[in-house]
Amino acid sequence: MIYTVTFNPSLDYIADVPDFRLGCTNRTVSERLIAGGKGINVSIVLQNLGWESTALGFVAGFTGDELSRQLEALGVQNGFIRVPDGLTRINLKLKSIDGTEINGQGPVIGTEQVQELMTRLDRLTHGDVLFLSGSIPPSMPDDAYQRIMTLLDGRDVQIVVDATGDLLTKVLPYRPFLIKPNNHELGALFGVTLSTRAEVLPYGRRLQELGARNVLISMAGEGAVLIAADGSVQEAPAPKGTLINAVGAGDSMVAGFMAGFMERQDYTYAFHMGLAAGSASAFSENLATRLEIESVYRQTFGGPDRK
């Protein structure tokens, strides 16, 4: 089974306000309300590629009801735990002003709900895949990732960690199967600026020496680099296309890589699938569909269609 964890999911209200002005009444020309959160994005792209997953995390209030409804409509298994008080957060994103958003806080998650999540994760065993993505809410213990890694240590669960800073470095001794920093996050860990694929290699290898088995480094328009557990290194520029929406592109890359690896156990194919999925989402208004991902894959890497 495949599981994703999103500790603080959201409903993303994406509004297009072309002539936005401070201190005035502004009106949208288009708007969408969609389920958001890094682990949720992974589950949606996996579903689009034909891989079922269960989304774990916490929801609250009527916004939590809507988030659960949307995921179930997409075919994602709902494993969210109800929090009795508060609301699943709404994040406002102004589409017409790139990078401008207001993110909500989300509900306070109590110790009982945290323990219920740990109980559910305690069922994972050999052959299962777990994605841990994003930040930890202030109401939760800041060592939640480490607790989960400790709980599952020695069970041969393939754990993917997409996090930053201390959240990432503290789980490396537990040998996660895959980590995916981008070049800016990787540079921040070591106090350097990394701009080219050649520059990220020695620092990616450092993370592998610290425990990560596979290190996938996303670099937006520069493409990506994979330092694999078998000693191979893959690198490629970004597929060609028009950037429409970068939100979720990194999550799509993680989902595409793992879908490719689970399909063929081949690092080259998994790397290409990751690049294709991440780019296809960046070229789309929404998270990429299977057809969009396969189209980018064929145009960029050629060869036979996916099996």
Image: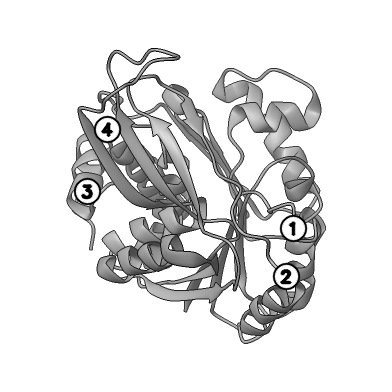
Quadrant including the C terminus: bottom left
User: As displayed, is residue 46 above or below residue 84?
Assistant: above
What is the three-letter code of the residue carrying label 4?
Phe
Q: Which of 122 and 127 is in front in this view?
A: 122
| Real-space CA distance between mark 2 and mark 1, rounded to the nearest whole angstrom | 7 Å
In the rendered image, residue 124, in percent from the top left (x then y), is placed at 60, 82
User: As displayed, is residue 87 above or below residue 14?
Assistant: below
N-terminal-most mark, 1 or 3: 1
Q: Residue 139 carries which label?
A: 1
In the rendered image, residue 271, in percent from the top left (x then y), is placed at 44, 46
Q: Which of 216 and 291 is in front in this view?
A: 291
User: As displayed, is residue 187 above or below residue 145?
Assistant: above
Asked whether the residues under the numbered discs 1 and 4 touch, taking CB atoms below 8 Å apart as contact, a structural biologist would say no
In the rendered image, residue 84, in percent from the top left (x then y), is placed at 59, 73
Q: Quadrant of residue 95 in the image?
A: top left
N-terminal-most mark, 1 or 4: 1
Point 55% across, 75% down: residue: 81
N-terminal-most mark, 3 or 4: 4
Q: Residues within 10 Å of mark 2 (few under 14, many from 20)?
A: few
What is the three-letter code of the residue carrying label 3?
Glu
Q: Residue 287 carries which label?
A: none
Q: Quadrant of residue 164 in the image?
A: top right
User: Residue under circle 2?
Assistant: 110
| Real-space CA distance between mark 4 and mark 2, rounded to the nearest whole angstrom | 39 Å
In the rendered image, residue 216, in percent from the top left (x then y), is placed at 56, 43
Q: Which mark is residue 294?
A: 3
Viewer-side label of 2, 3: 2
User: As displayed, is residue 148 above or below residue 256?
Assistant: below
Asked whether the residues under the numbered discs 2 and 3 touch, taking CB atoms below 8 Å apart as contact, a structural biologist would say no
Point 64% across, 21% down: residue: 199
